[in-house]
Image (spheres, rainbow, N blue to C red):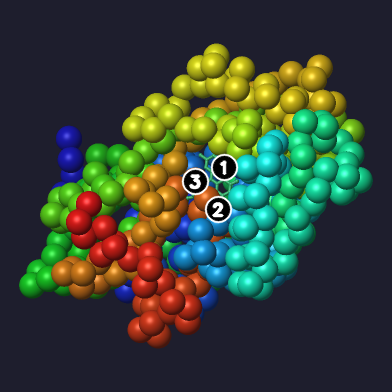
């Protein structure tokens, strides 16, 4: 049975307690805005807490490269700013090439990255052997970015949530946003549900960071958001003596590996199952992840201690949707990160905060607005 609704007020409401929502809450609260964040499960329960935690600027579309580079500058100072250990390490990122075609693609990408000020190195077979002797000899070269790194996904999300709370944000977990009230084209309130209790928050500003679940909610506003779910897997090996610090990936084998602080290696699949919210890990996924040993032969006799799946929010062009929605004043999106939003979260948080508080972001985001999909 539902209880009577109560009403509260907030200068801004954030839907979603993933890394992106928590980053926005953190930066808004630091500017004195005291937002309310609502998460229907727990903080970091979905993609953010299930991520591989790769904090990478290399191998990105040019339209988001500058954001990733700016975000990494924020990552470098976050732990000390928050006083929270996120296990952030700038251990480097190696993208491997198994054939000449991949090598040529990486070399072209390197030219563009260097022109944009991202310091990457293209390694031939001999340089790869020397710089990363733990790798198998099936690769003919690689592209390397020393400033890329990793963080612990759940600790990073909790760290930003904690920082947001310390700075004055209100975080309501196990609370779902179930509706929005719009009057004369302006957001005026959201409707939320916690257990059997419905309540209303009056607000002129709704920032929607609902990940793969964003379209379900927005369609009630008559807005089509082209975000689809996709499943991705991670397997965690037994702890091993320290072997490498880099995030290593091969798009030829469709597998990546990254070390965790206590010696476990997290192995993820580049391939995803599109169109599902299912989080089961089928046996084919385990066979796929076992390809990690083709990249790092020292893993040949290790076994997986545990596995999990998470839900990516994919857009048609694999770029996020960030910014205000035309036609509904006060409604902003930060969603559709298409499997690589972990790195971007701090800069997206800061820029959306600037948009709300200062009226415009300090870096251009026009290429990433929802309006680019007007014909989809
Ligand atoms: C296995 C895996 C590996 C990954 N590896 C990397 C990587 O190495 N590097 C990288 O950059 N990215 C990676 N990603 C992607 C990255 O994790 C995501 O892009 C990023 O975490 C997106 O964060 P988010 O806050 O947008 O979404 P989410 O973390 O999914 O958060 C959205 C939240 O909104 C909540 N929500 C939705 N609707 C409502 C509602 N109506 N009311 C209240 N709450 C609601 C959900 O419960 C959820 O917690 C990976 C993802 C997965 C699954």
Q: Residue furthest left?
A: 184
What residue would you read off at disc 3?
Answer: 339
What residue would you read off at disc 2?
Answer: 342
| Residue depicted at 74% across the width and 47% down the height | 142
Where residue 48 appears, as percent x and y from the top left, is: 52, 46
Where residue 58 appears, as percent x and y from the top left, is: 63, 57
Q: Residue furthest bottom?
A: 358
Where residue 202 appears, as percent x and y from the top left, is: 22, 67
Which mark is in front, 3 or 1?
3
**Is label 2 in contact with label 1 (beta carbons under 8 Å)?**
yes
Side of 287 where 294 appears, left or right? right
How far, Cα to Cα, is label 3 from label 2? 8 Å
| Residue depicted at 53% across the width and 68% down the height | 67
CA neighbours of label 3 inside 10 A, class few (<14), some (14 to 19), many (20+): many
Helix, strand or loop under label 1: loop
What residue would you read off at disc 1?
Answer: 51
**Is label 3 in contact with label 2 (beta carbons under 8 Å)?**
no
Q: Is the distance from the Cβ of mark 1 to the nearest ligand 1 atom less than 8 Å? A: yes
Q: Is the distance from the Cβ of mark 2 to the nearest ligand 1 atom less than 8 Å? A: yes
Residue 290, by quadrant, is top right
| Between discs 2 and 1, the one toward the N terminus | 1
């Amino acid at each position: 049975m539902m209880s009577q609704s109560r009403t509260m007020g907030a200068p801004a409401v954030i839907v979603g307690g993933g890394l992106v929502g928590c980053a926005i809450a953190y930066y808004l609260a630091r500017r004195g805005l005291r937002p309310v964040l609502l998460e229907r499960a727990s903080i970091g329960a979905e993609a953010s807490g299930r991520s591989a935690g790769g904090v990478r600027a290399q191998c990105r579309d040019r339209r988001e490269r500058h954001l990733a580079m700016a975000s990494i500058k924020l990552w470098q100072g976050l732990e000390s700013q928050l006083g929270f250990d996120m296990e952030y390490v700038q251990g480097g990122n190696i993208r491997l090439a198994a054939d000449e075609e991949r090598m040529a693609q990486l070399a072209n990408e390197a030219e563009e990255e260097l022109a944009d000020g991202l310091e990457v190195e293209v390694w031939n077979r001999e340089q790869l052997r020397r710089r990363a002797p733990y790798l198998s000899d099936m690769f003919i070269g690689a592209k390397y970015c020393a400033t890329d790194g990793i963080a612990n996904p759940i600790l990073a999300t909790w760290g930003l949530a904690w920082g947001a709370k310390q700075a004055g944000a209100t975080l309501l977990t196990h609370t779902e946003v179930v509706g929005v009230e719009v009057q004369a084209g302006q957001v005026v309130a959201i409707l939320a549900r916690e257990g059997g209790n419905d309540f209303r928050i009056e607000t002129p500003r709704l920032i929607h960071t609902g990940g793969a679940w964003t379209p379900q909610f927005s369609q009630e506003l008559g807005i089509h958001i082209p975000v689809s779910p996709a499943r991705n897997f991670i397997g965690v090996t037994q702890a091993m003596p320290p072997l490498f610090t880099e995030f290593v990936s091969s798009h030829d084998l469709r597998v990546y590996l990254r070390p965790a602080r206590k010696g476990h290696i997290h192995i993820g699949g580049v391939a995803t199952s599109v169109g599902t919210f299912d989080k089961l890990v089928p046996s084919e996924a385990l066979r796929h992840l076992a390809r990690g040993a083709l990249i790092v032969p020292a893993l040949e006799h290790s076994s997986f201690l545990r596995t999990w799946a998470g839900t990516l929010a994919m857009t048609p062009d694999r770029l996020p949707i960030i910014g205000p929605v035309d036609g509904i004043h006060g409604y902003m999106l930060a969603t559709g990160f298409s499997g690589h939003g972990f790195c971007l979260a701090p800069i997206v948080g800061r820029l959306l905060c600037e948009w709300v508080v200062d009226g415009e972001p300090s870096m251009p985001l026009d290429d990433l607005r929802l309006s680019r999909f007007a014909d989809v």
